[in-house]
Image: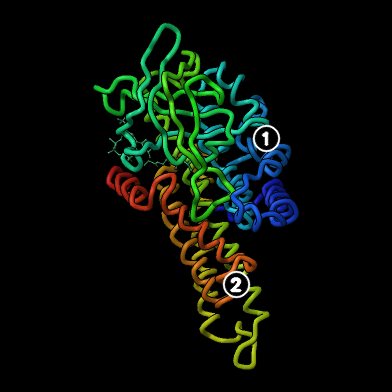
Amino acid sequence: MNFEFTEEQLMIQQTAREFAETEIAPTAIERDKEAIFPAEIVKKLGELGFMGMMVSPEYDGAGMDTVSYVLAMIEISKIDASVGVIMSVNNSLVNYGLEKWGSEFIKDKYLKPLARGEKLGAFALSEPEAGSDATHQKTTAVKDGDYWVLNGIKNWITNGQSADYFIVMAQTDPDKRHKGITAFVVEKGTEGFDHGVKEDKLGIRSSDTCSLTFTNCRVPEENVIWEVGKGFNFAMNTLNGGRYGIASQAVGIAQGSFDLALKYSKERKAFGTEIANHQAIQFKLAEMATKIEAAKLLTLQAAALKDEGRNYIKEASMAKLYSSQIAVECALEAVQIHGGYGYVREYIVERLLRDSKITEIYEGTSEIQKIVIARELLRD
Ligand code: CAA
């Protein structure tokens, strides 16, 4: 096993770190407070190649490996997890699936501008009554000549208001359960397609989340991804990739919490010395650092397996399960170490705590990750 990063991977990590510190950090508190979408930042991420990191240059992507993506995601999410999820959805849930299963028409028309960062993508699987139980899709698509007519509602869609292209799963043959689900690309502005109001969230407030409605929305046949009836398999395979993306986001939140806690504990004095000299604080720091290292290794392992073309389903779910859990734990400890200061916006750790919780919920709850892991264990 090789634990050394290549020069290119280190360079990408450094670029992401500098970008996060200089371009993302200055507006993070305000964007969180006012729930402002970071449009300018996303545009610049696109110029750096970070919105199409793993897409091959043939489709205008940066052609980087998954390990580099994980390293970049950690750096960005350390500073602002809202920007992290916007980047993760575009890379993992949209570009990856389109490159792997989209037709040449779809890749040319939709993937290329997404990979260049000129357009933004969203992934619409969840519904008001189909979250964890994703096979029970109620959104329907009925064939009418060269078009599919979509009707239904999608919920909790990250980038829902800001995206240009949406991957939408819908039932095309209800009798066939998940084998009757099909995935489509739907463009913003298509007649009969609208989005709801922005959700007023606990965390990741600078990313936008909303519902989508489809009312007799006509989508051309060539926008079917893979083939009719393959939409659920498409969504599951795509989510495997999303899961190491969110695991990286969670590692970033945990690392950001630790960095701030370490810095504060070396500055703040109590009982005549810096609080870092108290064993109570040292034990917290030691536990946080150990957990972060373990989460990072799990996440990098999933990424490395993917880069080697090996099965990474179990490892991606393990990485997401563990990293999200420790993100919440580390953020809580960081607030505790900061005491009262940890409870106010200026000291940032309160945002990291609010941002951390969603990592245990979206792209498959912790409970769903355990189902996926157990099934893979029993299959082995
Ligand atoms: N990878 C690949 N294929 C998978 C898979 C995986 N991880 N999990 C299931 N499948 C496949 C199965 O092999 C099966 O395929 P075949 O019929 O071809 O053999 C098919 O999917 C159906 O599987 P099951 O019969 O096991 O279905 P189930 O209903 O018992 O369980 C589930 C499926 C794993 C619980 C699934 O519904 C699931 O993952 N739910 C969670 C959904 C989720 O993660 N939602 C996140 C929304 S997206 C989001 O949050 C994005 C955002 O904006 C940030």
Q: Position of residue 114 (x, y in %)?
A: 62, 30
Count every numbered label the image shows and give the total.
Answer: 2
67 left or right, relative to 194: right
Q: Quadrant of the C terminus?
A: top left
Give me the residue at 53% from left, 33% from top. 94
Q: Position of residue 151 (x, y in %)?
A: 38, 23
Residue that lies at the very extreme toward the bottom in this rendered image: 272
Between residues 229 and 59, which one lies in front from this camera angle?
A: 229
Give me the residue at 49% from left, 45% from top. 199
Q: Position of residue 274 (x, y in %)?
A: 64, 85
Image quarter for ligand 1 equals top left
Q: Mark 2: few, some, or many residues within 10 Å (few <14, many ≥20)?
A: many
Look at the numbered disc 2 and say if its residue's Cβ is closer than 8 Å to ligand 1: no
Q: How is the image coloured?
A: rainbow
Query: What residue is shown with label 2?
Result: 261
373 left or right, relative to 183: left
Give me the residue at 61% from left, 51% from top. 71
Query: How far is the residue under mark 1 from the one under mark 2?
Result: 35 Å
Is 180 above or below relative to 10? above
Look at the numbered disc 1 and say if its residue's Cβ is closer than 8 Å to ligand 1: no
Q: Secondary structure at mark 2?
A: helix
Q: Are marks 1 and 2 in contact (CB under 8 Å)?
A: no
Q: Position of residue 337 (x, y in %)?
A: 55, 76
Q: Secondary structure at mark 1?
A: loop
Amino acid marked by disc 1 = Ala
Residue that lies at the very extreme toward the top in this rendered image: 145
Select label 1 or label 2 by which is in front.
Answer: 2
376 left or right, relative to 334: left
Q: Earlier in the sequence, mark 1 or mark 2?
A: 1
Query: What residue is shown with label 1?
Result: 62
